[in-house]
Image (cartoon, helix red, strand yellow):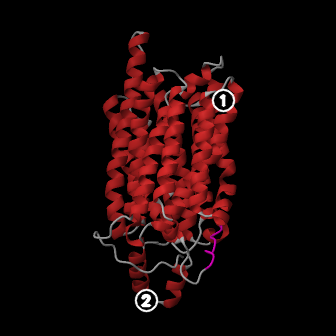
Amino acid sequence: MSADPVTTPDARVRIPREIWVLVAAGFVIALGFGLITPVLPTFAQSFGVGATASSVVVSAFAFFRLVFAPAGGRLIGRLGERPVYLTGLVIVAISTGATAFAGSYWQLLVFRGLGGIGSVMFTVSAVALIVRLAPPSIRARVSSAYASAFLIGGVGGPVVGGLLGGLGLRVPFLVYAGALLVAAAIVFVFLKDASLRPAEGTPVLPMMTVRDGWRDSAYRAAVASAFANGWGNFGVRNAILPLFAAVVIVDQSLDPATRETHQSLVAGTALAVFAAGNAVGLTIAGRTSDRMGRKPFIVGGLLVSGVATLGTGLATNLPLLVAFSVVAGLGAGALNPAQQASLADVVGRERNGGPALAAFQMAQDTGAIIGPVVAGTMVDHGSFGLAFAVTGAITLAAALPWARARETHPVRHRHDVAADGASRGGHDLERGG
């Protein structure tokens, strides 16, 4: 358990300026990433390759993120969060700029893949920075603000990227590289080293390893829910939902041009309303979790998201698909701030959580990589209903470890220990049970 003091949530506690710097940088990063999303497959196919090869370019980025995550966590432990964050941004900026000048498919593959190394560096560092900088009493609110910045940037990026693509397929990559350098400059100038120094008398922050984290029931549960969230909401929803809309929801008797237009509209609508539901869930859970505790929103979010994902495979028309997508978005939005805040509770402000946070990120990335592959196989050899049913079941199963995990919220935890009334029981709870 972290050494953070028990702190009563207070609406008057303001989000520190350093956090707003990270939020602003996160928005710029997400907006820039969204710029290249619509054009990357087309850019890959411009080198004369097919759909499979163009998909490999996307997977290479995720693969390098996954493989380099442990090393990124160790670098944070040795060098500190801020240097690793800045280095990661610069690496992605350079690789993205090089991608714009790729002269062959293999150059594109290498440049884009290497960007995954920098991506996991700044992703894990950002979480570690938020853990260190966020006041314990408003951790969920801080996580909500950061996630909302990424959500808004991620929604707006593809729109701008589609417009820039009309200027040439290489232009969005150059703009994204510039956006990353802007984000790096923001953090370099405005994030003060003083706020990251260890407490007086502590020359070096103790490091929280994966083994340390695994002793805590809340950390184990967070790794499980990260995997399920990556599988369902980051992987399967983005990869399979557009295909589901094209095959099941859209009338196949329409002429090809009209059918293609309807397919894009239906898929875009479903993803957009999911994002809208996500935004609402983020806002509610971000503030309320700091008062009521983490577990109700984590367990509730997993259950709501899981049931809605199960129902998605049963949708036969657009209104049903929209309804299930909104509900799934609400569940995912309720889950994320509370889950991030719980992870911050576990690590605490006086420990360097690089390795443990990297493992958490690896679990989410692993789910996002494996989920679409497994779901796609189920679609090819079974049905869309089966793919969404399995995905929903995995999300629901992730609620089970949380049902047995300890509550990490400082005030709620104090109340739970007091109610328990036994010092031994309180000690077991502190250790993660």
The total of numbered circles placed on residues is 2
Q: Which residues are magenta?
A: 203-209
> For this rendering, which residue is in front, 336 or 201?
201
Q: Which residue is mark 1?
A: 108
Question: Helix or strand or loop: what does disc 1 sit on?
Answer: helix
Residue that carries the numbered disc 2 in the rendered image: 421
Quadrant, the N terminus? bottom right
Q: Quadrant of residue 102?
A: top right
* Residue 34 screen position, x and y as percent: 47, 36
Which residue of the protein is positioned furthest toward the left in this rendering? 12
SS category of the residue bearing label 2:
loop
Q: Which part of the image, by quadrant, shows the C terminus? A: bottom right
Residue 233 is at least partly visible in this image = no
- Residue 417 vs 392, above or below: the answer is below
Left or right: residue 325 compared with residue 426: left
Tag 2: Cα neighbours inside 10 Å, few (<14), some, or many (≥20)?
Answer: few
Residue closer to the observer: 227 or 323: 227
- Give the image location of residue 82, x and y in percent: 56, 60
Q: CA distance from mark 2 to mark 1?
A: 62 Å
* Image position, residue 270 (x, y; %): 38, 34
